[in-house]
Amino acid sequence: MERHFIKELDALKMTLLNMAALTRRALEKATHAYLNRDEKEAQTVIDGDKEINDLELQVDNISLKLLALEQPMARDLRFIIGTTKISKELERIADQAVNIAQRSLFLCQHPPLHHIPSMERLMTIADNMLDAAISSFINEDFQQAIKVRQMDDMADKYTLEVLQTLVEYMVKSTPVAEKRLLNTNRSIQTIIISRCLERIGDLATNIGEHVAFIVKAINIKHQKIDFE
Amino acid sequence: MENSQKFITQHLNFYYGEFKALEDISITINQNQVSALIGPSGCGKSTFLRCLNRMNDLIPGIRVKGSIRLDDEDIYAPSVDVVNLRRRVGMVFQKPNPFPKSIFENVAYGLRVNGIKNKKVLKQRVEKSLKQAALWDEVKDRINESALGLSGGQQQRLCIARALAVEPDVVLMDEPASALDPIATQKIEDLIHELKKKFTIIIVTHSMQQAARVSDITAFFYMGKLIETGDTETIFTRPALKQTEDYITGRFG
Ligand SMILES: Nc1ncnc2c1ncn2[C@@H]1O[C@H](COP(=O)(O)OP(=O)(O)O)[C@@H](O)[C@H]1O
Ligand SMILES: [Mg+2]
């Protein structure tokens, strides 16, 4: 006979995975909406945020109940604590996706800026980081969990490149005052998008750290570990 | 808090006839701490506990190998006075087992065995022990009534008072709350927290939650072996071995 508690833990895991899938989808849609200047898609990201928020509450409720009623220990305890932390990170990632979607909506109203290769790289790396973080949770894979934060340097690098590119553009932009205002505005909105992506990298890094804690019971936060 | 070593066992093996009930147990029990022994039933917890005050000696056909030192003295050395050892290492059992005598006589029993006759001294020591066992207020007005009239939880605290009366260093408790209701259990647990200030306590419990609540050190036994021992907090949040983790999360066998 399968233990009731194990079933409840599985339900908690499924709720979190559901949340993770929606969050990843939100990020993909937001970046897609930016790249393709698709207002409709941007709007679906904004509209979909409530579902993710609701799932976060659901994770909290299940966790609280299990802590109170089952008095879990060891790995089970770490799993429940870790899950609530991961859900918080996912919720913030989804908020960043909403922010990207809102900036994209604004950018869609105006002619496009020139192509910025670093931005596309940044989008890819943020998506890869989130994907790796979620997979490490699914597979309970410590190595994969710590890999996430190793990708973070790249995310920071591309973010800086986006910033440099656009600052240069703003400085060199047209002497016509009206046009300059618009260019500055579009540039800043785009820089904000890059900042959101960089934050998503940080939050995905946190998820990896929570997974490391669940799997190996070691807190790798704020410290390097030997084999990194 | 003092952390001096009270008991040290080294390579302890214990046999009931041909059956090896304990295998190569090496563990250190610190003074003024509560050490909990956990593990599935039949893994040797009670056997180990009874080695520590040589209660097993009463069973025919037993053999002990390896060493058990109490305050750096081998308790199985020929020179050891077993009566005195059992005074220093008291024991409380699963089922409260008061004698069919008055409350007073139950607690005074061990004192009389140890030759104390002075009425005044007896009275003082009985009162002190009942206070230490958090029972005094409940029984002070009926100290001469039969102990059998007490509730199960009170009887168990009486047995603790009886163990404390002879001023032991160590108190062994073998599932002391398993026959009690939750409120009586909680009283015993609170009492254990109090008692460790003066005594060293080793408790066998089948309740993981109880071990987590009352102990400083937890030792996990399985099939006669000591699998893992460590700070209770560590054992219950991040045990080193998968076997321990599986047991305390109920995924065993
Ligand atoms: N008096 C005895 N004679 C023979 N075997 C015993 C005796 N007492 C216990 N055993 C055996 O020793 C093993 C350990 O028992 P015990 O110490 O009571 O385990 P626990 O307290 O962990 O449940 C068990 O297999 C049990 O059957
Ligand atoms: Mg037993």
Image: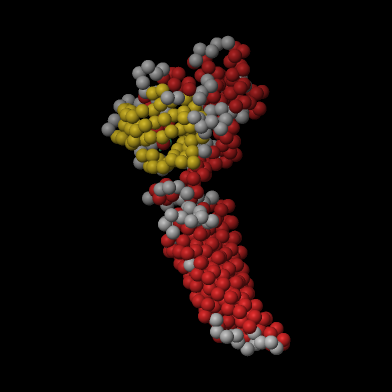
Splitting the image into 4 quarters, where does residue B107 fall? top right
Q: Is residue A65 above or below residue B5?
A: below
Give the total of numbered labels: 0
Above-or-below relation of B81 to B244? above
Q: Residue furthest left?
A: B18
Q: Is residue B168 above or below residue B229?
A: above
Residue shown at 43% from the left, 40% from the top: B229
Look at the image and name its color scheme: secondary structure
What x and y, as percent, mark residue A45?
Answer: 60, 77
Furthest residue toward top: B118
Q: Residue at x 61, y 64 (%)?
A: A57
Q: Position of residue B234 (x, y in %)?
A: 49, 45
Q: Nearer the viewer, residue B161 or B155?
A: B161
Q: Nearer the viewer, residue A170 or A156?
A: A170
Point out the quarter of the image occupied by ligand 2.
top left
Q: Nearer the viewer, residue A170 or A87?
A: A170
Residue B8 quadrant: top left
The relative height of residue B55 versus residue A156 in the rendered view (above or below) is above
B50 lies left or right of A50: left
Question: Depth check: A28 or A116 in front?
Answer: A116
| Residue B201 in sight in this render | no
**Residue drawn at (58%, 23%), measured in percent from left and top?**
B129
